[in-house]
């Protein structure tokens, strides 16, 4: 098994890893298991991939620093009672897909689009503690050790090359997935049950009502019935919900609560008040979604009118300005596109897609210097095929 793993792993040239095979005790479950990565390798791997993985997923959500602080505080409160001390970090990703993920070493992200599906602080704690266990119990690390991710790395890389730079409507479709290879696409049933069970123990230790892990799972099961691919691409694909998980969580919650010696909180009101600002943007985000679907279907006038309405309702969201930029590009309104991408950059000056979009708009307007500067900035933030190709066409 080792020799089968070593050859493909060596292809991951950006990770100069020395493999030291050995047996060790899992820090969460106490089970003996094979470990190929030692802790420092695990931590440095996750730390190195954290920024590019965020870039590939939409970048950080910058419009609500209070909400970011809140998510981080809840995460750290759970991290303090976890069975394994790691350099945990918690961020919000600016993406409407309901999803959350953990990299090896405790780097954890939750999407803006998942936060709006939760009802209470304890449900947020259920999401975060579940991800903490994926990192702490080495589920993420084990997937890499198994070489499970390699086929997806190679698959994504080749599909990213298949792009059409001349079609401005789809400027962001390519390249962006390249940073996502460390997000595990599926952990498997056993790891999910383990994350639920230990996650609920951490919730209890931190004073959250573990019952919220039951209601969270029920929400997921409900949403998975007749839901769109959007959901299946996100949370439900990497952490498949099931009636089995609902039942197991219910048993665990009951058992844990019988032994509880402290008041346990659900934090319904506090969560609603923290989510207030983001909830007010939901109509604008829904219209943006409709606009982007219309763009994909080639209905540019519908895309244009929907995004106009969205922007009339909300000017504070980088992704909405960026969507307006994409639609302007498809309509070949390059000056408008520059304005929209500049607005997105003003809100989040650290996301490669906004510089890529503005750079491509400048290129179309023959503003060579401006185009080159933006495309180089985009490449510095996150390397993409689209920016590389545009820069090559500019001649450097
Ligand atoms: Zn999971």
Image (cartoon, rainbow, N blue to C red):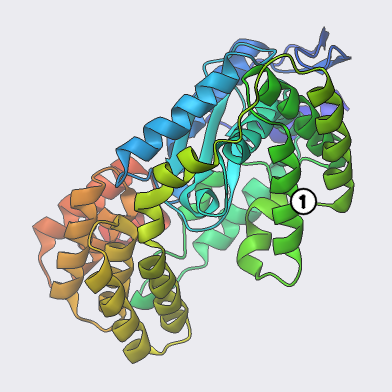
Q: Is residue 239 visible?
A: no
Please state if 393 lies on the left or on the right of 184 as rendered: left
Q: In this view, does 184 lie above or below 133?
A: below
Rendered residue at 36%/83% (across/down): 303
Please state if 235 lies on the left or on the right of 366 as rendered: right
Image location (x, y in percent) of residue 253: 80, 32
**Which residue is labeled 1 in the image?**
240
Rendered residue at 34%/51% (across/down): 277
Say few, some or many: other residues with alpha carbon within 10 Å of mark 1 (under 14 / 14 to 19 / 20 or more). Answer: some
Q: Quadrant of ligand 1?
A: top right
Quarter occupied by residue 132: top right
Image location (x, y in percent) of residue 182: 60, 38
Q: In this view, does 154 lie above or below 17?
A: below
Q: Is residue 141 above or below residue 63?
A: above
Image location (x, y in percent) of residue 337: 20, 71
Is 284 or 354 nearer to us in this picture?
A: 284
Q: Can residue 87 be seen in this view?
A: yes
Is 192 or 13 nearer to us in this picture?
A: 192
Q: Which element type, helix, strand or loop, lies under badge 1?
A: loop
Image location (x, y in percent) of residue 40: 59, 11
Please state if 323 lies on the left or on the right of 239 as rendered: left
Quadrant holding the N terminus? top right
Rendered residue at 68%/49% (across/down): 152
């Amino acid at each position: 098994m080792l020799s089968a793993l070593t050859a493909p792993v060596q292809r991951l040239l950006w990770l100069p890893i020395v493999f030291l095979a050995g047996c060790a005790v899992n820090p969460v479950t106490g089970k003996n298991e094979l470990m190929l990565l030692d802790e420092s390798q695990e931590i440095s791997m996750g730390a190195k991939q954290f920024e590019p993985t965020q870039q590939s997923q939409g970048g950080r959500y910058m419009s609500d620093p209070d909400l970011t602080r809140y998510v981080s505080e809840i995460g750290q409160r759970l991290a303090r009672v976890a069975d394994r001390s790691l350099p945990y970090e918690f961020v919000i990703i600016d993406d409407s897909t309901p999803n959350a993920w953990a990299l090896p070493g405790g780097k954890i992200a939750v999407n803006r689009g998942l936060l709006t599906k939760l009802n209470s602080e304890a449900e947020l704690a259920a999401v975060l503690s579940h991800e903490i266990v994926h990192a702490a119990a080495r589920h993420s690390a084990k997937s890499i050790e198994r070489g499970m991710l390699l086929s997806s790395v190679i698959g994504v890389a080749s599909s990213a090359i298949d792009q059409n730079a001349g079609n401005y409507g789809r400027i962001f479709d390519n390249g962006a997935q390249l940073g996502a290879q460390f997000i595990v696409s599926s952990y498997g049933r056993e790891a999910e049950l383990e994350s639920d069970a230990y996650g609920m123990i951490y919730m209890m230790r931190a004073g959250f009502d573990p019952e919220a892990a039951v209601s969270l799972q029920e929400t997921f099961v409900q949403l998975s019935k007749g839901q769109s691919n959007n959901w299946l691409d996100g949370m439900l694909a990497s952490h498949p919900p099931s009636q089995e998980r609902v039942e197991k969580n219910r048993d665990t919650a009951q058992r844990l609560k019988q032994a509880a010696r402290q008041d346990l909180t659900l934090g319904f009101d506090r969560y609603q008040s923290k989510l207030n600002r983001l909830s007010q943007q939901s109509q604008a985000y829904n219209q943006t979604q409709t606009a982007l679907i219309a763009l994909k279907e080639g209905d540019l006038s519908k895309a244009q009118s929907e995004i106009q309405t969205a922007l009339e309702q909300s000017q504070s969201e980088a992704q909405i300005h960026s969507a307006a930029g994409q639609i302007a590009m498809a309509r070949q309104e390059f000056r408008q596109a520059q304005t929209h991408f500049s607005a997105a950059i003003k809100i989040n000056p650290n996301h490669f897609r906004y510089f890529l979009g503005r750079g491509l708009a400048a290129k179309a307007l023959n503003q060579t210097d401006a185009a080159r500067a933006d495309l180089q900035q985009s490449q510095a933030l996150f390397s993409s095929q689209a920016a590389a190709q545009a820069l090559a066409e500019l001649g450097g």
